[in-house]
Amino acid sequence: MVKITKEQDTEKNYVRMLKVIEEFLKDEKDEIANLSNISAVLNEYIDNINWVGFYILKNGDLVLGPFQGKPACIRIKGNPGNGVCFACVKSGKLINVPDVNAFPGHIACDSATNSEIVAPIYKNGAIYAVLDIDSPVLDRFCEIDEKYIDQVAQAITKWATTP
Ligand code: SME
């Protein structure tokens, strides 16, 4: 079993977290097993968050996947495609929202959330899921968070795309 040990330094902590995630992805192809463990790993390593998990794109809707935190919206409809998660799907890029209350169409699953970061995950070149992380802290996510959360999404993209 992969050991979870944390570092004080933010970047070192993220580097260690990525290694743990790559270790989990290495030998297993089951989606639920891997995304479940990755959401648990992210929850262990990232401080000051209240929700972390995945929404999987299914027939145009984003459907709740493995996560850690309070129960969340089960299905985010592709029509009209509101919220931060669909903004990420539409742009195809990571979105960092410092204040969700100022984001038009934000979908509040937990009123404690104040900031949110969402990264796209691709499979064979098309968006397959998003990684969503919420925080009760305003402006919680900085450039270092963006860099490594994007790298997590890229590691899952590589795993999802590899036959
Ligand atoms: N806030 C997201 C919805 C998902 S929850 O945060 C878990 C959004 O606006 O798309």
Image (cartoon, rainbow, N blue to C red):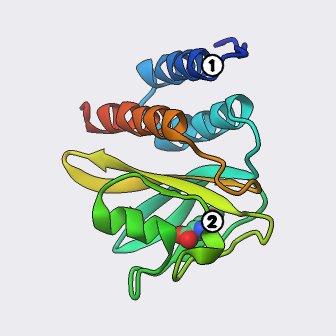
Nearest the viewer among 27 and 60 is 60
- Mark 1 Cα-neighbour bin, 10 Å: few <14, some 14–19, many ≥20: some
Q: In this view, does 115 lie to the left or right of 143?
A: right
The residue singled out by tag 1 in the image is 13
Query: Residue 5, image x and y in percent?
Result: 72, 13
Write the residue at 75% across / 53% down. 137
Q: Is residue 52 left or right of 142 when viewed as pictured?
A: right
In the picture, the quarter occupied by the N terminus is top right
Residue, disc 2? 99
Q: Residue furthest bottom?
A: 80
Give residue 43's quadrant in the image: top right
The image quarter in which residue 71 lies? bottom right
How many numbered callouts?
Answer: 2
One can see residue 107 in this view: no
Number of the label disc, if any, that sits on residue 121: none
Q: Is residue 49 visible?
A: yes
Quarter, ligand 1? bottom right
Residue type beneath disc 1: Asn
Quadrant of the rendering where the C terminus is positioned: top left
Q: Residue furthest left?
A: 125
- Looking at the rendered structure, the secondary structure element under dot 1 is helix
